Image: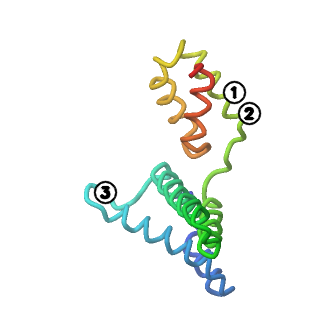
Amino acid sequence: MGVLDNLTEEIKNAMRSKDTVKLESLRAIKSAVLLAETSSGSSGNISDQEAIKLLQRLVKQRKDSAAIFKEQNRLDLAEPEEAQAEVIASFLPIQLTDQEVESAIATIIESSGAEGMKDMGKVMGMASKQLAGKADGKRISNIVKEKLGA
């Protein structure tokens, strides 16, 4: 579990510094990890890939909540959600820039021989596997659509 190796130490540091936003975020991560480890069909440990997917899901949940709160003019609720999303995202691998994602997808399209939207599923599968944890799925999807001429 390389991605989450220092989670317990980070929780202790957040407690010492009385950083409530960071502490809530870290506890949410720990809770989600424990749920994943104890769920039926689980081996008791989660891999780095599973941990990255879990962290991405937590970040997406926070960002979606913040967007809803902003729509309802509830900035007092949106700001903590965004702050938690940032803390959780700090455990993710460094995200690729749009240019890096575009070049990776262009390479995938070229190597797979994709020609148009009918091949989107094939390209998305390869791109999602290759860029897992390094780029958001929505970003990947939008760039694939753009490259395949949607």
Q: Which residue is mark 2?
A: 99
Q: Quadrant of residue 46?
A: bottom left
Identified by mark 3, the residue type is: Ser
Image coords of residue 18 (percent x, y): 66, 87
Residue tagged 3: 42
- From the viewer's perspective, is residue 142 above or below residue 88? above
Asked whether 77 or 25 is in front, the reply is 77
Tag 3: Cα neighbours inside 10 Å, few (<14), some, or many (≥20)? Answer: few
Position above or below: 44 against 116:
below
Which sits earlier in the primary sequence, circle 3 or circle 2? Answer: 3
Q: What residue appears at the point 50 percent right and 52 percent down from the top-left corner? A: 48
Task: Identify residue type, mark 1.
Answer: Ser
Q: Position of residue 101 (x, y in %)?
A: 66, 34
Distance, label 3 to label 2, CA atoms, is 37 Å
Left-right relation of 144 to 121: right
Q: Which residue is mark 1?
A: 103
**SS assignment at label 3:** loop
In the displayed structure, 33 sits above or below 148; it is below
Q: Is residue 5 visible?
A: no
